[in-house]
Amino acid sequence: MSGPIIFEVDVQIAITLASIGYLGEGAPTDEKYQLMSAALRQPDLPTGGRWRIVWGPAEWPMGTEPSTSLWYIAAGLDAQGDSALGVVIRGTQMSVWESKKLDLELELVPILFADPTAPADVRVAQGFAKEIQNLLAAVDLRSGLSGEQFLRQYVSTSSPPPKVKVIGHSLGGATSPILSLWVKSLFPDLEVRPFPFGGQSPGNRAFADWYANAFAPWPSRYINRLDVTWMMFAELAQIKAMWGGPDCPEWVKLLIDGVEELLRFEQLCYASTAGPHIFEGALYDLSGDGAWEMEARAQHEHLYYMFLSGIPLQVIRNGLGPKWSPPPKLGQPPGGG
């Protein structure tokens, strides 16, 4: 007989910080900051009112809406009560073409920051490299500091030094592994732990191995088994046979065939990172026109990842998603309250 599912509080904190990064889409930066700060003050969320934004949100392009890229840094206490920083990357903005385009630029290119530990043949997706470039160019309008300037200042004046959690969902889940290696290159003596949720494969086998070796004690990423996004672009063929419920639309099959042919022709070899933590979701069993597309969207939802991590439904509704519901067949996960 299997034992009870054990939910890790640090994972719950991380996915909560990732979800808070989506607040205020299309709003001015100051309004985003107010909404995100208010969410962090919610006592029943895993962040428990013990976290606050210390830098950002910083956006690119700066001073325009809608923005393509956004990240922020929060300070608080982790599950062990230790001082921690959450470096959080927002996911794709589905209403913004320039944001969606970052998921589709598949040329494999070198990383954009110097790291003496990086193997020479490491390559990452061009769109993800651009996202990292955007983030590093963004400046916090309140402090006037870039993310690197803030981190160097904060770490140099902190005693004891903080643990650093590098967090993201979706596009943030694809790029947080890259950014975590950047943070580790800046602060090789700090404990740096990545928390990528539902992200695509960032790069080639050399990248996957480098990343796995750098963060060997922890899962490489957190995925819902029924989410198709993490299958891009190392496991594309699996998408066609997903779920056994709604048929995969012909246009999706043709698109997958086209992308697979492009990857073969350009000799672009993506690789999955080893050792993920897998959440066991359930289907919504949607029907009618667009059922497959709606199921794909629902399985990738960041609030669903919160639920699968063991955060109670009522907490999610009170704090971030008042109308969100899990699949009827799933109910409340064990231990979720």
Image (cartoon, rainbow, N blue to C red):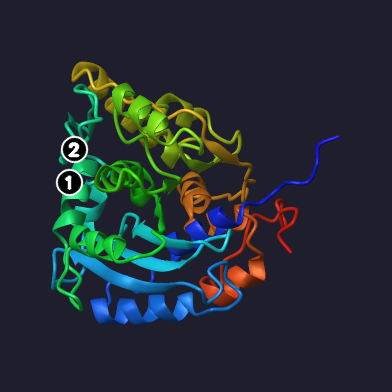
Q: Which residue is mark 2?
A: 126
Q: Does residue 193 sit above or below 307 in this rendering?
A: above
Query: Could you tell me the amino acid type at mark 1?
Result: Lys
Q: Can residue 295 be seen?
A: yes
- The foreground one among 197 and 77 is 77
**Quadrant in which residue 95 is drawn:** bottom left
Q: Can residue 227 be seen?
A: no
- The foreground one among 264 and 185 is 185
Residue 313 position within the rendered picture, expressed as x and y whole percent measured from the top left: 65, 66
Q: Does residue 19 sit above or below 187 in this rendering?
A: below
- The foreground one among 55 and 31 is 55
Residue 306 position within the rendered picture, expressed as x and y whole percent measured from the top left: 56, 58
Look at 20% across and 42% down and name the residue there.
Answer: 129
Residue 73 position within the rendered picture, expressed as x and y whole percent measured from the top left: 33, 65
Look at 24% across and 40% down and name the residue there.
Answer: 104
Query: Could you tell me the amino acid type at mark 2?
Result: Gln
337 to the left or right of 65: right
Quadrant of the frame with the N terminus: top right
Q: Are marks 1 and 2 in contact (CB under 8 Å)?
A: yes
Disc number for residue 182: none
How packed mark 1 is, by other alpha carbons closer than 10 Å (few <14, some 14-19, many 20 or more), is some
Residue 243 position within the rendered picture, expressed as x and y whole percent measured from the top left: 58, 36
Q: Does residue 16 sit above or below 241 in this rendering?
A: below
Q: Which residue is mark 1?
A: 130
